[in-house]
Image (spheres, helix red, strand yellow):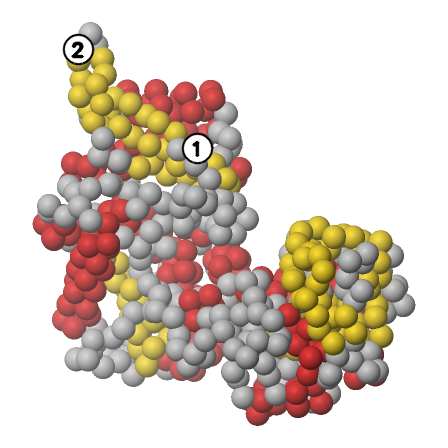
């Protein structure tokens, strides 16, 4: 399989670069800048992309790399800091820009450059830099420029070394996809054979070989990643798979039943549901601090799950729904350290599986969803919205009780039902109800009430790093409010959160 290496120097867009390459049907993987040169030599990459980064190449603590990488004969594309680093390693000149460029900038390109084939002479790109290449290294030619950036792109075609000051991976760059395509296919000679179907067939074959006739246990949370991992493992080994689903009583209304119905009916596996709602409610009694709630929920889940495993299934393999962003980290920092993530569960010392299986470990979220669709998972399970690990425990502000969970589940169900029926669902990135723990005065049926307030949160976003509050039509908001108040016992007021991220977060706790 042809591969492209994205060598990470701490840029905020490192994952986006890899995703854009994969969108062009070429497999890309991310490694930190501390990866040894020998490892890169051994992996047979068709091309290398140096990412951007927040540093100046002249800073002592800024990430650098062995200049020998430029002599491997592998095509290299440097992006922003990556282009400056390439220039620095070859004795080009980097200076602090007189005018910092940030945002949309028009550049002029040389159409005869292999990198800019098919790109208009004048085009809009996305810039984000304070330093720039004032003089490229000997042997390089300038292939793009702007009024304030004398070297917006440079190249040494003989050695297949290219650098761009802008970010072709972001959608703001008009012909960014074309630039990446030119690099992958025209310069690196890739064919574009990365397909989801190929991934499924290849992974199923590998899983069968690895697992053999042994069993495999997966902790099924009902989230997208674990759902798709379960479906993929089921296709590979069928009844050898046991999925343990811990229903802690903090999921959305009917969600536990929907997960059980889908996996018990559609896939060949052993599905085990552990109902332990009262255990969690008891452990959370009187607790109001959000971090303490998170810790209790995580601890109880870990205990319940592993108690079940110890009793019945502590042989064979253990599987997780780990995906690529769970495993990789920014190139800046200790490359040996892998981030702790909720999808990466630590095994207790007294549980001894033969190995840990992570069938989705090389995929991004959008790729995981495509695999789920290919495997025939229901749309609701594949396109499930982001849901916090502690569930409704952190959408109930203050103490969590069974009654509060009931109120929030009912209100959230009405919200989701109305949005879905209106056809507005695809316009929203995430939407949910919150129980803030605020009681308000109201009048219902000529009687005074003092009941709960429900807050609605709905956002639109491309990446969840920033988010805007959704401009839901007033008539839809009116129907949602009316139904919640009329159908959810214990609620007499509904409000809508119109705060952006930042300063707020998407979740309330």
- Residue 103, given in percent of the width and then of the height, sits at 67, 51
Q: Report the residue that reaches farthest toward the front.
A: 98
- Ranked by sequence position, the earlier of labels 2 and 1 is 2
Q: Is residue 406 above or below residue 380?
A: above
Q: Is residue 356 above or below residue 219?
A: below
Residue 483 lies left or right of residue 93; in this view the side is: left
Residue at the image point whose x is 19% and y is 80% from the top:
349
Residue at the image point whose x is 80% and y is 64% from the top:
150
Q: Report the residue that reaches farthest toward the top.
A: 446
Residue at the image point whose x is 64% and y is 70% from the top:
81
Q: Nearer the viewer, residue 65 or 258?
A: 65
- Residue 453, given in percent of the width and then of the height, sits at 26, 28
Residue at the image point whose x is 54% and y is 62% from the top:
12
Q: Quadrant of residue 149?
A: bottom right
Residue 418 lies left or right of residue 318; in this view the side is: right
Crowding at mark 1 (Cα within 10 Å: few <14, some 14-19, many 20+):
some
Instruction: Confirm whether residue 275 shows in the render.
Output: no
**Which label is found at residue 498?**
1
Instruction: Confirm whether residue 411 shows in the render.
Output: yes
Q: Which residue is mark 2?
A: 447
Q: Quadrant of residue 218?
A: bottom left
- Residue 252, given in percent of the width and then of the height, sits at 30, 43
Q: Secondary structure at mark 2?
A: strand
Q: Nearer the viewer, residue 165 or 346?
A: 165
């Amino acid at each position: 399989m042809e591969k492209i290496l994205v060598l990470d120097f701490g840029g905020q867009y490192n994952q986006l670069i890899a995703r854009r390459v994969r969108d062009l049907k070429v497999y890309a993987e991310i490694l930190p800048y501390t990866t040894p040169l020998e490892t890169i030599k051994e992996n047979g990459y068709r091309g290398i992309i140096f990412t951007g980064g927040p540093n100046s190449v002249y800073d002592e603590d800024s990430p650098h790399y062995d200049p020998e990488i430029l002599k491997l004969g592998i095509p290299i594309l440097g992006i922003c800091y990556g282009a400056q680093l390439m220039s620095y390693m070859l004795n080009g000149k980097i200076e602090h820009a007189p005018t910092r460029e940030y945002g949309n900038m028009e550049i002029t390109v040389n159409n005869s450059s292999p990198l800019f084939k098919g790109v208009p002479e004048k085009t809009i790109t996305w810039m984000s830099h304070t330093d720039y290449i004032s003089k490229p290294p000997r042997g390089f030619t300038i292939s793009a420029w702007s009024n304030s950036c004398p070297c917006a792109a440079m190249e040494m075609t003989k050695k297949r070394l290219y650098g761009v000051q802008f970010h072709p991976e972001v959608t703001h760059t008009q012909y960014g996809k074309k630039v990446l395509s030119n690099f992958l296919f025209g310069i690196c000679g890739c064919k574009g054979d990365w397909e989801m179907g190929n991934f499924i067939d290849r992974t199923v074959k590998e899983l069968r070989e690895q697992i053999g006739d042994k069993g495999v246990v997966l902790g099924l949370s009902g989230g997208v990643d674990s759902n798709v991992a379960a479906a993929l493992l089921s296709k590979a080994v069928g009844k050898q798979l046991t999925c343990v689903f811990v229903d802690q009583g903090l999921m959305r209304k009917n969600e536990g039943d929907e997960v059980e119905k889908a996996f018990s009916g559609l896939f060949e596996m052993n599905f085990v549901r552990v109902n332990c709602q009262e255990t969690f409610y008891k452990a959370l009694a009187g607790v109001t601090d959000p971090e303490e709630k998170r810790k209790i929920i995580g601890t109880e889940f870990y205990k319940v799950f592993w108690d079940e495993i110890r009793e019945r299934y502590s042989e064979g393999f253990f599987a997780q729904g780990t995906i690529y962003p769970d495993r990789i980290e920014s190139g800046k920092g200790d490359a040996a350290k892998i981030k702790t993530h909720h999808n990466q569960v630590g095994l207790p010392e007294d549980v001894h599986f033969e190995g840990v299986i992570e069938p989705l470990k090389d995929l991004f979220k959008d790729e995981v969803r495509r695999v789920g669709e290919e495997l025939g998972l229901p749309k609701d399970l594949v396109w499930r919205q982001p849901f916090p690990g502690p569930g409704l425990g952190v959408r109930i502000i203050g103490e969590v009780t069974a009654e509060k969970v009931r109120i929030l589940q009912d209100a959230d169900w009405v919200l989701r039902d109305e949005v879905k029926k209106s056809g507005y669902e695809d316009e929203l990135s995430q939407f949910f109800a919150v129980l803030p723990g605020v009681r308000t005065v109201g009048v219902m049926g000529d009687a005074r009430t003092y009941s709960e307030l429900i807050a609605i949160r709905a956002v639109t976003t491309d990446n969840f790093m920033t988010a805007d509050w959704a401009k839901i039509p007033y008539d839809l908001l009116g129907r949602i409010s009316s139904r919640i108040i009329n159908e959810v016992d214990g609620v007499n007021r509904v409000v809508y959160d119109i705060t952006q991220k930042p300063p707020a977060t998407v979740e309330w706790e």
